[in-house]
Image (cartoon, helix red, strand yellow):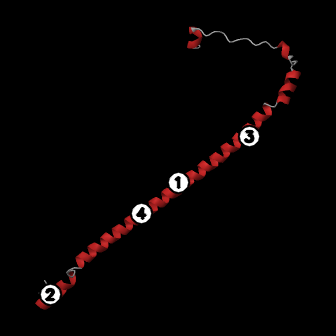
Amino acid sequence: MSPPLPQRMYTLLRSTVRPAPGARGVIIGLVIGAVAITSLAIAKVRYRHEIVSLGFELSTATEKQRALDEHHRSLELERATLADPQRIRAMATALGMISVPPDAIRVIPPAPQTAANERGPR
């Protein structure tokens, strides 16, 4: 067993081990500050990630819209080409169709509406 320390040495050793009065509040404040700064940093990273994700979605949607517009233009061109009267007239002539004179056209009045016609097809 070691010999007991003199009172004065014991007091010096004990005072170096214990935190100074008021240091506990400073330490708690520093820990709270570190937690707050970390929380803010995490929130900033989360919001930045959300911004990047939304930017990617916007880019994808814009590219899809551009592709759909291009497809729509090509379909409009095809419709205009197919509906060209000269093309239709040439196809009709190739099939042996002829133009009908206006006096040969007969207009048939619509059939009177009955209860069966109003209900529609079954």
Q: Residue at x 73, y 11 (%)?
A: 108
How many marks can you see? 4
- Residue 89: x and y in percent read 85, 25
- The reply to whether callout 1 and callout 2 are in contact (CB within 8 Å) is no
> How packed is label 3: few (under 14 Cα within 10 Å), some, or many (20 or more)?
few
Q: Residue at x 56, y 51 (%)?
A: 57
- The reply to whether callout 1 and callout 4 are in contact (CB within 8 Å) is no
Q: Quadrant of residue 69?
A: top right
Q: Nearer the viewer, residue 111 or 24?
A: 111
Of marks 1 and 4, the one in the foreground = 1
Q: Amino acid at mark 2?
A: Thr
Q: Is residue 6 visible?
A: no
- Residue 8: x and y in percent read 13, 91
User: Residue beneath label 3, please?
Assistant: 74
User: Residue beneath label 4, please?
Assistant: 42
Residue at disc 1, secondary structure = helix
User: Residue beneath label 2, please?
Assistant: 11
User: Residue beneath label 1, please?
Assistant: 54
Q: Is residue 13 visible?
A: yes
The relative height of residue 88 versus residue 106 in the rendered view (above or below) is: below
Of marks 3 and 4, the one in the foreground = 3
Of marks 3 and 2, the one in the foreground = 3
Mark 1 or mark 2, which has the lower sequence index? 2
Q: Amino acid at mark 1?
A: Leu
Q: Amino acid at mark 3?
A: Ser
Q: Is residue 52 left or right of residue 106?
A: left
Mark 1 or mark 4, which has the lower sequence index? 4
Q: Nearer the viewer, residue 77 or 119?
A: 119
Whole-number angstrom distance, CA of label 3 to CA of label 4: 48 Å
Q: Amino acid at mark 4?
A: Ile
Q: Residue at x 66, y 47 (%)?
A: 66
Whole-number angstrom distance, CA of label 3 to CA of label 2: 93 Å
